[in-house]
Image: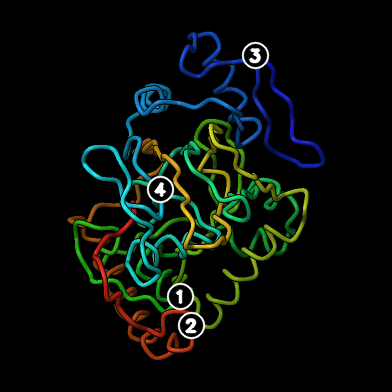
Amino acid sequence: MKVTPIADKVFGAVVSELKLGELSDAHFAELNTALLKYGFLVFPKQFLSDEENVSFAERFGDLEFAASPMSNKPKNEDGSYADVSAIDTQLMRTNVGNEAWHTDSTYKPLSSKCAMLSAVIVPDEGGETELADLRAAYVALDQETKYRISQLSAYHSAQFSQANDLGDFPPQDETSIYHGEAYLRPMVKIHPETGVKNLFVARHAFGIPGLSREESRALLTSLRDFVVSDESRVYTHKWQAGDTLLWDNRALLHRARPYDYSLPRVLTGTRVAGDPESELAYYPTDPEAQAGREALAAELAILRVEAKDRMFGATTATQGRYSAR
């Protein structure tokens, strides 16, 4: 097994001379150490089956979901793929939303530990996946900002981010990611395995308690912009069929890049759930959940007016009630 750090970046590594489908315990221990150090790992030309994808991911913990299509083509029951979805389906609206910087599942009670994507079909141009290092960004902050944000938290909601970024208002459904809850999370996270501090801000974050709406939006935007302002903290992965990409959701941002949406882009996604001791905000049945619901409802009411000039014009999709994971 060979681990090669990404050139000119402060994070990331390429792992070669290893088959993930035939992984020994010793090699897994090395990979886990490398993931904690580098934040993400690239495995070229693995061509993992769904079973191998799931088996590898389960070594990291319980799965939030396993070997699911992250695609503009819905998967049929027989394993084949349907036609490319139209841009006004909820599937595609959600996919386009993923083109903004985010961390996975912060809009759920239990945010994600790590995630992986494996490329099946990729366009010749565009459709890359980018990652950004929240650890290095925190180190680079000035002391005044570190002090200011040290005790601050923000609510997280996928309904907020879709409305704010795209003017998309999916039907509220408690069985989907558009469930009407918002979860309060600290803006500075201490990594549960390394003890390293990092920023924890993403497109899903809004409504910092104790700040006005204008102050909250300005601070969250400035911090996200700061994370990606240094090229050494941002990596762009140009997909080749067979590639697998694994990253630590507790320490990195990521996003998809635009492409010709009439062409197929099919990735297999598997997400590992976080440890409840470190990634749990609260459950909808807990008393503190009500404040999140109220904050989200108030914010969405404002965005119904503000977001009319954004991509989807403060509307609901006319086709399909699919919502991504």
Q: Position of residue 17 (x, y in %)?
A: 64, 15
Report the Cα–Cα distance between label 3 and label 4.
Answer: 28 Å
Q: Position of residue 13 (x, y in %)?
A: 68, 31
Q: Is residue 107 left or right of residue 225?
A: left
Q: Position of residue 152 (x, y in %)?
A: 51, 62
- Provide the residue designation for mark 4: 70
Task: Tell me if mark 1 has few (under 14), some (14-19) or many (20+) residues whose alpha carbon lies within 10 angstroms of its own.
Answer: many
- Provide the residue designation for mark 3: 1
Asked if the residue under mark 4 is in contact with the one under mark 3, i.e. CB atoms within 8 Å, the reply is no
- Provide the residue designation for mark 1: 166
SS class of the residue under badge 1?
A: helix
Q: Earlier in the sequence, mark 1 or mark 2?
A: 1
Task: Tell me if mark 2 has few (under 14), some (14-19) or many (20+) residues whose alpha carbon lies within 10 angstroms of its own.
Answer: some
Residue at (73, 25) in percent of width and height: 4
- Provide the residue designation for mark 2: 310
Residue at (19, 61) in percent of width and height: 174
- The three-letter code of the residue at mark 3 reads Met
Label at residue 180:
none
Q: Earlier in the sequence, mark 3 or mark 4?
A: 3
Asked if the residue under mark 2 is in contact with the one under mark 1, i.e. CB atoms within 8 Å, the reply is yes
SS class of the residue under badge 3?
A: loop
